[in-house]
Amino acid sequence: RSASEASGEVPRRASFFTSAPCNVRMRFRTTFTSRLSKSMESTSESSQEQSFAQRVVKSVEFEGFISIFILANCVTMGMQAHELVTGDFGADALYSLEVSEHILTAIFCVELLIKWKVFGRQAFYPDHADGRSNFADLILVFLTGVLLSWVIPIIVILLKLDNATTLKTLKVCRVIRLARLVRVFHRVPFFRECWQIIRGLSDSIRTLFWTCVVIVLVTYVFSIFGLFLMVVELQGVRDRTTDAAKIESIDNLMVYVGGLDRLMYTLIQVLTMDSFHGVTRELKQYVWWSWMYFYAYIAVACFVLMNLVTAVIVENAMSASQHDSEQAMKEKEAERSKELKHLEVLFRRMDTDGGGTLCWDEFKSSFSDPEMQKVWSMMDCRPEDCKELFELLDDGSGEIDSEEFFQGLRRMRGGATAKDIFRIQKTICQMATALGQVQEQVCVLGSEFHGSPCRASPKSPWKARRPNSRKGTHDSQISESKKDAATDAGRASLPQP
């Protein structure tokens, strides 16, 4: 600083408005105004970034239109399955079903081609939610539509195979296409509640599996106790009796309880509250305490276990809704980290000297590199914007560090959000207030210098007050006119220079 002061140069960190030349201030004001107008208009421009075709394909109306054909395809498949078994439909109806199958397959293929044309092949990459859904649709349409409806029938005809047997077997595979109903429930708002039920069912598959395991274990334990305590006593009664009717009745009971597998099957019947009283009442005639055995199993398996399973499923459904918001935050964070890694690689490639900062020469040379030009074009940065972009990223030191580079490019890559617009409006309001105060001070200094009163400057429109009544407005106008008249009279009394 001392050397610069001795040489008469203004330090680089000095105040911008006191040290910068007039043309630099004008260029700064022009740049700031253009950038401000771009930021304020970014919300309206963000909606125009997507083409008309993209907005149509993403619309709810388009999804509803395709969902109609998916539902129609499900109806035709049900009619074909019914005809395959019963043969109730005539030849004309069967021909109409075959024609509708080809028409629907063509419509689904056209839909996938439209998505490929509009969004590109990236729309079918299974690395995001929409990509996985589109990829699943592609597999289903190709396997159950193109392959089974067009390719394989042509091969069967060319190879002269048995058309009836082969095609009927392949038509069974078309049932897989019913999985596209999940897409209808997921994307059409009318089926929102149905989608929640399907989502809860899919989330409860693991709970359902372990519920079946626990039921099998409980039933297995009760069956072992029943064989040792109840069935053995029943066999003893049969051995001691000589009545043919009792022997026949006990033999009929042994069909239900005479073995581990048979008793477990009977207990599962008890678990589902099926008609088991015919067995238990007859068994009670020979083993009097058998009713306690069955009701103990009902208490453990039905009352306790089933209610616990219901509670676990409800808890999973509630936690799944919370997990959706957390998963959305994680995906956003993952996208942000991926973006930071991309910017970090870009910064390292631009920092040729490895100093950790970017000077003007390094920044300018990146726009001359063919590979770097591709990266800049993907970020909507043109070579003619090089100087302006450097000035926006630089904080005045003449070099751009990594933090300035990351934060600046991340802000410029997307459209302005409501928070950014509000921040700009707040900054403008503060600048207007500060300029108003400066103008008042200049007026006071001018009046002291010339010895004449200075007319008060109007208040900033950002903080203009609204009058409470018409009378208040009239009075304020009268007072303002009196002040203006007094000021003009004072100025007229002064000698002209």
Image (cartoon, grey):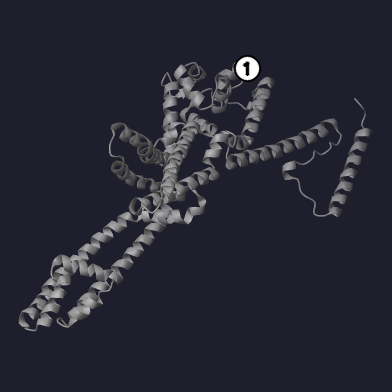
Q: Quadrant of residue 428?
A: top right
Q: Residue 23 at what x, y percent from top left?
A: 68, 20
Q: Position of residue 76 (x, y in %)?
A: 43, 49
Q: Residues within 10 Å of mark 1 (few under 14, many from 20)?
A: few
Is 276 positioned to the left or the right of 463 in the image? left
Look at the numbered disc 1 and give the secondary structure of its residue. Answer: loop
Q: Is residue 215 visible?
A: yes
The residue under label 1 is which amino acid type? Gly
Q: Quadrant of the C terminus?
A: top right
Residue 182 seen anywhere in this rendered image of the structure:
no
User: Where residue 442 sits in the image (x, y, percent)?
Assistant: 77, 33
Q: Along the line of sight, which residue is nearer the eye, 368 or 443? A: 368
On screen, 381 above or below 111?
above
Between 318 and 492, the one lying in front of the other is 318
Rendered image quadrant of residue 165: top left
> What residue is shown at x 41% (from left), y 21% (from top)?
354
Q: Is residue 480 shown above or below 223? A: above
Which residue is labeled 1 in the image? 8
Is residue 241 found left or right of 451 in the rendered image? Answer: left
Is 440 on the left-hand or right-hand side of 176? right
